[in-house]
Amino acid sequence: MGRLRKKGKAGAAKAYMTRSAAVKKLQCSLADFRRLCILKGGVSAYFRASREIRRRLTRDHKAFAKKISRALGRGEWSTAKHLEEQKPSYKLDHIIKERYPTFVDAVRDIDDALCMIFLFSSLPANDRVSAALVANCSRLAAEWQLYIMHSRSLRKVFLSIKGIYYQADVMDQNVTWLVPYQFTQNIPSDVDVRVMLTFLELYQTLLGFVFFKLYTDVGLIYPPPLDASRDEAGAGIGAFSLQVADPKVVAPGPGSTTKKASSKEVRRAIKSIVAGNSGSGHDESMDVVDQTPEATEADEEFVPHPSTNDSGTTASLPTLQTLSSTPSPNSSSLFSAYTFFLSREVSRPVFEFLIRSFGGRVGWPPSSGSGSPFTESDESITHVIIDRPAVTRGNESCEGSEQKGKRKCVQPQWVADCINAGRVLLEDVYRQGATLPPHLSPFDAKPGAYDPTAPLTESAGEAESESEEAKGVAKETLPVHVDAESLHAAELAAEVAGVEYDEFQKGMKELETRRRGAAGKTGKRGEEEDMGKVLLSNKKRKLYERMKHSQRKQEAEHHVLKEKRKKIEKEKRQSPR
């Protein structure tokens, strides 16, 4: 018989280290330990943090802080300035490479990074958030929007109370991020900005790697040049210019991360060089080599063969060629045939990004910033995005132009609903001053969530007769325990509502019968549930009760929403047309 092992002396239990022990082992403060865990993506910085970043974040920084505080205390300003210029710095490049082995892993994890970048780009600069940090976040946000507009990768948009949700398809990955509305933001005093700044430091480095790869893959120069004069004039993302990379540039050194050329491109380049040098003396072997990929692609096509066991027809399997030849939806060019003009009350950065992401042309008045490609008097304008009530003054040319058929005035929700629907919707429902349809979320809801588009199971949508109204009045006026006083009050309420006495009595009898049947079924079902609970253990019984509580809460919320919808449908039917 082997020696018995004591608990906590071997295995994972022995390797476990508490936070206090890790902080003591690293000889750092709790704030530095939390920062190490955020940057490395683990719960224990002792085993995962590298020696360089621990030294840079703790020892070197502490030594620098002591030296500069001593110089400032002694009044040695030149020494303090010299120390400030030699402030120790570190890079997070190696951490990004460790946490994301492939590029797809990094793209899959940039949702939170984009949300944080767009949040800090809208914050004001103060003593806790520097102006340089806000400017860098604004630059990264503009670079991401430029790439989405250039590649036309945007798929969904939802205007919510929190902000605007976007979803794009980048490298076959759904990237969703939240952009706050353009209101004056303030930083709450109870928020620990240091933790957010640590995350932001990591996210800035991550997005720098990702954007460089995305730009270079589509043949663009990164970072895109910024026109300072246009930026000061309020051009927004129009201050950046996308420039195509020169294909004749010499390949960079081994430290770069540019895309490798394929063997087919190399053979084509060699063929062009040989043809240019030798003229008519062309090597015929190059043609044979260059035709090899075409023959290989032809061989990749699946050839069906009949099975020996089944004499029926064979099913056609999809291949690379058949998938590439499948027509894709042309929703990325949804607005390519339209020209939009944004009114002064419409958020220009939001709808400029939406319209240009789907191929449309957009202009705006000078009060919204400079850089508009055309003015309001342009004859090519097809739609005017306006978000104010309709007016009857003669100087407002929108309604007159709409009547002439030159341009259509729609509300901003029309753009978002067209993007989510994947087609251009009718403008009459979204005309200026009209009551808009509900703006529903295009994202997939959780299982069991309320679906506002599902038809009502009861008689909603149909005209209610007088007898149904009488039943409804009787149901409302019927008390829980029927006595003389409550019955008399119910009769008075029915008389005020204009319900006849016979119909009232009939409705009360039917309602009482239904109530008794429902009470009997509920009691029987409750007895069965109680009998089933007896057979469960204490832990499983509590879990079952929590599940039933969440189900009842969800059903109550659905009931409230359904009753609200029924009320709205009833008001629509009763309102005069």
Image (cartoon, rainbow, N blue to C red):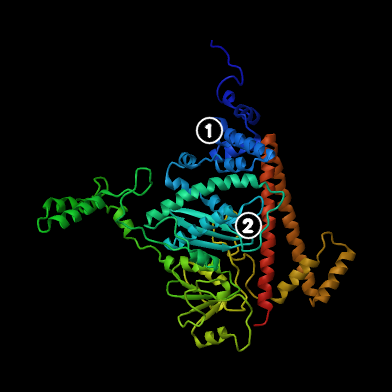
- Callout 1 crowding tier (Cα within 10 Å): few <14, some 14–19, many ≥20: few
Position of the N terminus by quadrant: top right
| Above/below status of 10 relative to 224 | above
Q: Quadrant of residue 386?
A: bottom right
Q: Is residue 183 something that shows in the picture?
A: yes
Q: Which residue is mark 2?
A: 123
Residue, far right = 485
| Above/below status of 274 relative to 471 | above
Marking on residue 48:
1
- Callout 2 crowding tier (Cα within 10 Å): few <14, some 14–19, many ≥20: some
Q: CA distance from mark 1 to mark 2?
A: 33 Å
Task: Give the residue type at disc 2.
Answer: Leu
Residue, far bottom = 394
Mark 1 or mark 2, whichever is nearer to me: 2
**Nearer to the camera, 66 or 240:** 66
Q: Quadrant of residue 244?
A: bottom left
| Above/below status of 209 relative to 569 | above
Left or right position of 561 against 310:
right
Position of the C terminus by quadrant: bottom right
**Nearer to the camera, 37 or 427:** 37
Task: Give the residue type at disc 1.
Answer: Arg
Q: Earlier in the sequence, mark 1 or mark 2?
A: 1
Left or right position of 40 against 76:
left
Residue 387, given in percent of the width and then of the height, sits at 60, 75
Q: Residue at x 31, y 60 (%)?
A: 325
